[in-house]
Image: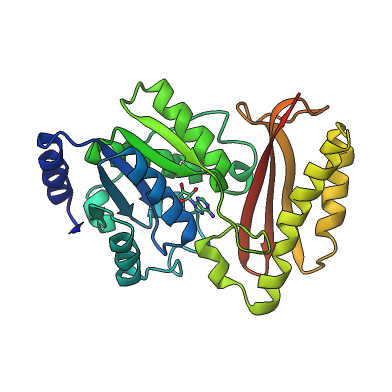
Amino acid sequence: MLVAETIGEIRRNVRQARTEGKTMGLVPTMGALHAGHASLVEVARARCDHVVVSIFVNPTQFGPGEDLEKYPRPLEKDLELCRAHGVAAVFAPTPAEMYPREKLTWVTVEKLTTPLCGRSRPGHFRGVTTVCAKLFNIVGPDVAFFGQKDAQQAVVIRRMVADLNLPLEIVICPTVREPDGLAVSSRNQYLNPQQRRDAAIIYQSLEKCRTLVEAGARDADEIRAQMQATLAQVPALEAEYVEIVDAETLRPVDPLAGKVLVAIAAHLGATRLIDNISLDIR
Ligand code: AMP
């Protein structure tokens, strides 16, 4: 497995694989790899001959006061996971390699980036779309793989690729969960044991929504109130949003109909967690 720190090295590696007629898959990550990332790699390996994992804690998607400095960077462990899962090359650039000069050019997706996480993290998605556009241009994959865990990110990236006619396919993979339902996340390691137990309430609240919908509920405000009540069972948890939106436009839906995204962001102490489920309501 090649570990490339420079754009030149990863481009040479990809060019070589292309001359061998291989199809190219890219899994963009910020490292601190876990079972969720591993599942993306597995899907990528099933689809593509040559899988590249990028590991880059992208400074431009962190706001002031967010966890950029404390974000975990266990590179050796990450490389082990990549080797174990048959990754062909890891691209792990420094910030200076990715951003060698004052940043003047950005890729911005409008509208889809303002609700949900966009409200509390202005500039976040602009950082995500810009770094993904750069990674797509550097690696040139046929397919890039993202997780449903970051549902808004998935919608935004898909839209960027469609609007800019980028020549790749975006595949969204299901959320990998812990046995108690908590979505696996690099940020879960910030939680103390009590917070870790409390965090399971987020998925329970999402499941509450699913149960209500299965029983025929369609009134968004009523469902959201019951989801809030579930979350309130953990007083230490502070809900940032509980939203039911159209899965494509991310606009609120009421009554519930069609493909909807049910999404929660919540704080446990200093840790911000997000999770979602999608429902297809006929
Ligand atoms: P991150 O390293 O957190 O930026 O995540 C890199 C990719 O892994 C993103 O496309 C995430 O949506 C995806 N991902 C993170 N957690 C999970 C999970 N629990 N299940 C599936 N995909 C995930």
Q: Would you place residue 214 above or below residue 234 in this image? A: above
Residue 158 in the image: x percent, y percent? Answer: 46, 30
Residue 183 in the image: x percent, y percent? Answer: 60, 57
Name the quadrant of the C terminus.
top right
Horizontal side of 266 relative to 210 (left or right) equals: left
The residue depicted at 76 percent of the width and 49 percent of the height is 207
The residue depicted at 42 percent of the width and 44 percent of the height is 127
Name the quadrant of the N terminus.
bottom left
Q: Quadrant of residue 18?
A: top left
Q: Would you place residue 75 above or below residue 103 in this image? A: below
- Number of on-image labels: 0
Q: Nearer the viewer, residue 124 or 77?
A: 77
The residue depicted at 83 percent of the width and 27 percent of the height is 255
Residue 124 in the image: x percent, y percent? Answer: 49, 46
The residue depicted at 41 percent of the width and 38 percent of the height is 129
Residue 121 in the image: x percent, y percent? Answer: 57, 48
Horizontal side of 10 relative to 98 (left or right) equals: left
Q: Residue furthest bottom?
A: 193
Instruction: Indicate how the structure is coloured in the image.
Output: rainbow
Horizontal side of 94 relative to 113 (left or right) equals: left
